[in-house]
Amino acid sequence: MPLHFPQLRIGASGQFPLHRQIHSRTVFPFPNAPAPLRAADDRAGRVEWKLRLRGLSDDEVTKLHGLFRETRGGHESFVFCDPEDNLLVQSENLSDVAWLRSAGVATLAAVDFPEVAQSAWSLSAPSVGLGEMWQHADLPTDRYWTFSIYARADAAGTLEMFVRSSHGERSRHVELSSNWERHVLSGNGWPPGNGFDVGVRLAGGSIVQATAAQLDMQAAPAVYRPTFARCGVYHEARFKSPQLRITTIAPHCHQTDLYITAPLPE
């Protein structure tokens, strides 16, 4: 299983204030040409975070030391989830291949969508049996997580949200109205493991509209962030500093400033 940045005991990956910078580079293949050509160097793009972590417990410091030791400082990579980003791809394009569907579930572009989104989709289940739509998240199961989605229905009905892994399933039935509402399913407590699915389940013959799906590795939903082919999961993150400096303020109270960097996905 790949190494992951540890989650804080408060159920988050960072604390406020959060600092994030994106670095890019422009190349000039022929700088002396009459009209110099310019091109973006896609492989040079990087994102950097500064995490100011305060009030850390002994256990949290132990986990940070363990990750730093296993990655040999900045020599090896780990997976880092951006605290300010959505961890699902194609958050509004529910017809994309990233969203898996059970047999008989159909998607059709909807004409209405909430203010937070630019599009929505009408989901219809087969006339007999349940219909499911889900996306797989290659993330640890033993963390706080929150799945949210905006949904509505022309006729009163219910929608079942679920999160499932090899350890079992958590679900929640939500009542739908004709107005767009954000529905949330959150929790923690699964044993260690890697990989789970988040999605929705429809009753046979039902039709609902949905969009703005989001996954947060924290105990509550964050402000919705739209995603396309990229999301906030960085698989090649590294510590930028060759040293991990921990300051002890009092017993069981520590602090540190961490600098993490990762290449922008192509």
Image (cartoon, helix red, strand yellow):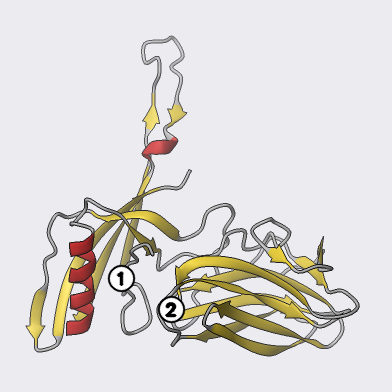
Q: Residue at x 31, y 75 (%)?
A: 15
Residue type at numbered disc 1: Pro
Residue type at numbered disc 2: Gln
Visible residue check, residue 57: no
Mark 1 neighbour class, 10 Å CA radius: few under 14, some 14 to 19, many 20 or more: few
Q: Nearer the viewer, residue 213 or 31?
A: 213
Secondary structure beneath label 2? loop
Residue 26, placed above or below residue 109: above
1 or 2: tag closer to the N-terminus: 1
Residue 185 quadrant: bottom right
Q: Nearer the viewer, residue 68 or 155?
A: 68
User: Disc 2 marks which residue?
Assistant: 218
Circles 1 and 2: CB atoms closer than 8 Å: no
Visible residue check, residue 255: yes
Q: Residue at x 69, y 59 (%)?
A: 93
Q: List the single residue furthest toward the right.
A: 127
Please state the horizontal and vertical placement of residue 225, each as a whole percent of the image.
Answer: 54, 65
